[in-house]
Amino acid sequence: MKEYSIQTISENYKMTAYGVALGDYKDWAGNAAKTAAKKAEITENGKLAELLALSDGQEHQINYVLDGQAWRGFGVMGEFDVEGAVVLDFLAGDYIVVPGTGADKERLADEITGKVFGGLLNQIPEYSYVGPGNSTFVRADGAGGFYGEMWLRSQKNPS
């Protein structure tokens, strides 16, 4: 499997999500705990299921800069008016798309994220990640495992 591709999105799009602000983005353990607690909360109270029912049913893990602060959440493609959720803008342009496969659905998004920010972005000199966010989805691959992709808005670097 190729490590990444470049895909062009021609129109801005929105995602609706529930999440948490990350006060110190370098506090990996604390942020993982906050994120896990938010995921458990929206799963148990049915809020995530409500969003999934309004959309195409594909859940996304989202990292975003919201009000100048790192933010992480779970949501869906599209704009929905749901209490407690935020609507995030994703801009048209080029996106670095990083695929991954694995046997554990809950870990695959984090594995892809680790791969991207653990060095893969440094191996793509022709593009720079510009945000303001990224999203990752994971779905069953039909063969007993899982397939996922992380999408990161980027811009082509000058030659």
Image: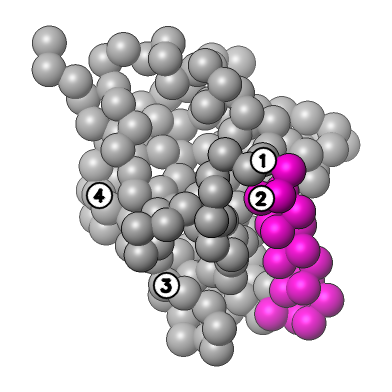
Relative to 109, is 45 above or below? below
Label 2, on which residue? 31
Residue 27, position as x, y percentages in the image = 63, 43
* Circle 4/circle 2 CB separation < 8 Å: no
Badge 4 crowding class, 10 Å Cα cut-off, few under 14, some 14 to 19, many 20 or more, is few
Of the image marks 1 and 3, the number of the one nearer the N terminus: 1
**Nearest the camera: 91 or 145?**
91
> Which of the numbered marks, if any, corresponds to residue 87?
3
Residue 118, position as x, y percentages in the image = 57, 21
* Circle 1/circle 3 CB separation < 8 Å: no
Q: Is residue 140 magenta?
A: no
- Looking at the rendered image, the disc whose residue lies closer to the viewer, 4 or 2, is 2
> Which of the numbered marks, if any, corresponds to residue 1?
none
Of the image marks 4 and 3, the number of the one nearer the N terminus: 3
Magenta region, residue range: 29-47
Give left or right: position of 121 versus 25: left
Task: Look at the image and tell me in which quarter the C terminus lies.
Answer: top left
Q: Secondary structure at mark 3?
A: strand
Of the image marks 4 and 1, the number of the one nearer the N terminus: 1
Would residue 78 be visible to someone looking at this image? no
- Looking at the rendered image, the disc whose residue lies closer to the viewer, 4 or 3, is 3
Task: Look at the image and tell me in which quarter the N terminus lies.
Answer: top right
How far apart marks 4 and 2 lie (CA) works out to: 29 Å
Of the image marks 4 and 2, the number of the one nearer the N terminus: 2
Q: Which amino acid lies under the numbered mark 4 shown in the image of this protein?
A: Ala
Label 1, on which residue? 28
Of the image marks 2 and 3, the number of the one nearer the N terminus: 2
